[in-house]
Amino acid sequence: MVRGTLALAAAIVIAAAARPVTWSDLTPAVQARLEQAGVTAAGFDAKVADLDRSARSRVLEGDYDHLIFYILQSTHFTTLPPIEPALSARRAITAAMTDRQPLPLPADVEARVSAFLAAIDARDDDPRLAYFRSLMANSREMPLEMRKKVVALQYTRAMWFLHFKEFAAAKAGHAEQLYESRGLSTDTEVEAGYAVQVGLGVSKGLEPSKRIRRVLIVGPGMDLAPRTGMLEAGPPESYQPWAVIDALVSLGLSKMDDLVVVGADINPRVVDHLRASAATPPELRLVSGLGASDTVTLTSGYREYFAALGGSVGQAAAGGVGGAPAGHLSKAVRVSAAAARALRAEPLDIVTEQLSGETFDLIIATNILPYFDHVERLLALSNIAGMLAPGGVFLHNDARPEVLEDAAAAGLAGEQLRQVIIADVKGAPPLGDTIVLHRRR
């Protein structure tokens, strides 16, 4: 009882509110780099406020991106054939030959838009529909044709980005900067947990006696509606917190009864979802984003990871996952009450804010750094360093040299880099991820 009380007290302390970053929070090396980029102490607070406003706008754009990808791909609200977003973008942009607003909705897209608008007006309580119904709440009283125009504007914006990404960015030499101005996506997949587990295994090998009690996951996201390959085998889920808890306990780095994992996301709907999951442990319906085929072979390491996934956070649920595509790994796991007690959720803009209170032994931030320009990245890495305990570990998956240099300026010394292969592809490079390990000096 005493130990449980202490764990609860630690959770209350660590779940502190975010506060804006200040100039004095930054290392001299980060301050010097910001000054070279035109950001000075005198204008710092105004810059932070401007970045915060921009980020809130990008969150909304990201949600609308997912709305369009859902309308094009979902098989829940209509029997019309799904439309691959990238192909729709190519067709729409090629036909328009101009960036006028909005693009005319192709007939098949308009049919799906009409079916979607009818579905959100109905009493269907599907969780994805509920998410988008909430997103479009302000337009519910508009006439139907006006609501179609609202969707058409978002379709135009999403299609121009997608067309540039898939067909023009690499040719124009802008691939690396592509995400720095787009909407902030909530995308996540089961595969992301594999690279993190490999990184945690490396960390354990470097320091076998280390114990991790306080963890921050920046931008855990939610598998709402990706831009391609959408699966609707289960409700939207934020896999990463459960996968991290599972990995930490299974590797012997943490004990469930004194572990606190904070999922911090800029999207308030993701935070609400995590808080609901912590209150009512979910049944995870895990489906691999990649599927085995004549040309794709999942590696034995990834298969072993998937087979063991969930064993430390819950128990296999009867019935498995219905509707999983052929070749994809799948399983259902009912999260235990003990694992759910370890999870907290907080709103956080990692570029402009830090969580006050105790520091963390481990911070994980995968698939978020590419969304930031140089100034934003410097601030994000500085905030991560500021929330990390001395000797604490920071894991991410962006191995660009400029990222490593900015991390070093923030006091995060690079220690290890690993390539993690998830699948081999016939006639093409393998599919995988990178994991980078830093330690706070």
Image (tube, rainbow, N blue to C red):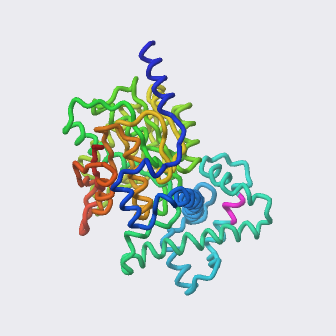
57 lies left or right of 163: right
Q: Quadrant of residue 147?
A: bottom right
- Position of residue 253 relative to residue 398, above or below, is above
Residue at image point 38% right, 26% down: 256
Residue 427 horizontal/vertical position (percent): 24, 69
Residue furthest out toward the top: 1
Residue at 43 percent across and 62 percent down: it is 375
Magenta span: 114-118
Q: Position of residue 19 (x, y in %)?
A: 53, 44
Q: Position of residue 294 (x, y in %)?
A: 29, 62
Residue projecting furthest to the bottom: 97
Q: Residue at x 36, y 32 (%)?
A: 311
Residue 329 magenta: no
**Residue 285 visible from this viewpoint:** yes
Q: Is residue 86 above or below residue 424?
A: below
Q: Is residue 117 magenta?
A: yes
